[in-house]
Image: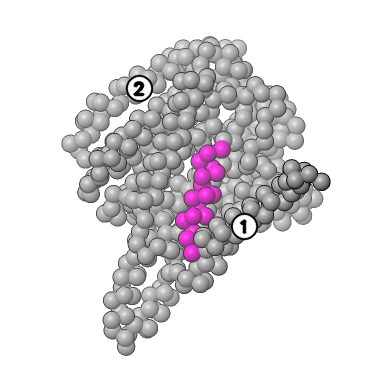
Amino acid sequence: MEPIQILFISLPYLMATALALLVVLFAGAAIGRPFLLLAVYMAVFFTFPQSSYGIEAVFASAPIYSRGSGQLVFPFVLWGLLLGLAWTWIGRRFARDLPTGTPAVQGWLAAWCLLLVMHVAAALAVGAGAKAALSQNGFVHIPWMAPLVLLMLWCAVSSRTPKHETVARLLVFAGLLKGGFGLVRWIAFGGDPSNIYANVERLNVKLTFFDIADNQVCLIALAAATSLLLVRRSERVSRFWEVLCSVTAAVCLASIVLSYRRTAWGGLLLVALLFFLLLPAKRRFTFALIVVPPLMAALLFLADQRLAKSPFTGFEKFFADLLQTASGGDTTRRLELRLAWEAFQNSPITGVGSWGRFAAGHQIPWQTGEDAGAFVHSGLLHVALKSGLIGLCLLGGLVTAIVLQVRAALKVDSAGARALALAGAAGLLFMIPDFIFGTPVPQTRTTQLIAFCIGLPCMVVAAERAAALRHSLGSLHRRPRVALWAAQSVRSAQ
């Protein structure tokens, strides 16, 4: 046998061996550094889109977020999250890291996990099956937020000193890469191929990103960069980072505006309002004068292109698919919402179940096959449909806990901490229009990015508490007689 033949035969085995060695080396490096696991995991969600709606390619590759979900119920990427969480737990046992405490956010996410278990039990009781109850068309992705938030909390308390500014700068850099890619593709390569407006509606528009999650990544970086530059900055930022943050803010803002997504535009305006309120009074007038007029002018111009074929005029064009037709009938989007609302009214307390669906879903063009009637173009109504008033109450409790956590994080007197808190808050505000009018709940990527935004202010608070606890324990260790008793008391209080 020729040497070249031997090489080709052995090449797959050599590659598998090399990959296994890389995994072992990475696992060894990450066991005491959970930030590495978090960075690799989030790099997947920052990079790869999930939506292929409107793409013209005959054979479109399956997104990474669905790989493995056929046999394993959940995709590989989520199993990887659990594996990373377990590996971090083992590392914490060796390092004896400080406890994270139990923020209210974790409690509400745990309640969602319990609700999912109850729905699985109910599905087994009525013969629907556990797999149907755990389908992505239910609310399974909300409980899946809990492992990511917990991993972020463990990352926060694993370092001797808070790494707020390092994480904030990584977000800025990641957003610059994402927004820069979108703009270069828009300028030179015709924009995002997943373009329903051009490919289906035949509008003469090209866009940066159709996937709302790509726009959310840009928004997170935009918020972090703007915070480092403008909002109550008490620490000096180097000239290099001032320039980089300014470029990132401009690139990410342009990328979001050129997405042609109405939910992205609405979320951007909510975030602009947040920063306006947080700016010092002296800077608000400058912000309103310099930023708001050109932003509104750009949005109105692009909205006119995006809604060129709408039968409505004026402001009604923006909500054309939610209004009645000229003959007084329902548009398809309005019909979908009405059918889902009627199904919710028939079972308002518990909903139709995570496996359930609304009737007559086949009347909606995009409700086809097994998914007909299983999801709704409204995250809020989707939660109500699947889990009833119980789910809405849990959602309200989670939102309240997030608001309180953001307020606590904003009190930390650090530019990096404030940037992370505002990036998380802005990322969640940005998703409000999509949560009302879009389909975020059935999407793995969108819900995991929402969980990431929830975790950012939680990381800030946990890291500051851990730093204060280490400082107090360090002081007590200089007094040996009370050190052990005090350490045990502080730990039990957590």
Residue position marked by numbered label 1 in the rendering: 21
Toward the viewer: 151 or 38?
38
Q: Residue furthest front?
A: 2
| Alpha carbon separation for disc pair 1 and 2 | 53 Å
399 is within the stretch colored magenta: no
Residue position marked by numbered label 2 in the rendering: 296
Looking at the picture, how far across and down is residue 468, in whole percent? 32, 67
Report the span colored magenta: 32-48
Toward the viewer: 385 or 274?
274
Q: Is residue 233 left or right of residue 436?
A: left
Name the residue located 45 percent from the left edge and 52 percent from the top edge. Answer: 455
Vertical arrangement, residue 41 with respect to residue 308, above or below = below
Name the residue located 46 percent from the left edge and 56 percent from the top edge. Answer: 35
Kind of residue at badge 1: Leu
Q: Residue furthest right?
A: 1
SS for dot 2:
helix
Name the residue located 52 percent from the left edge and 71 percent from the top edge. Answer: 93
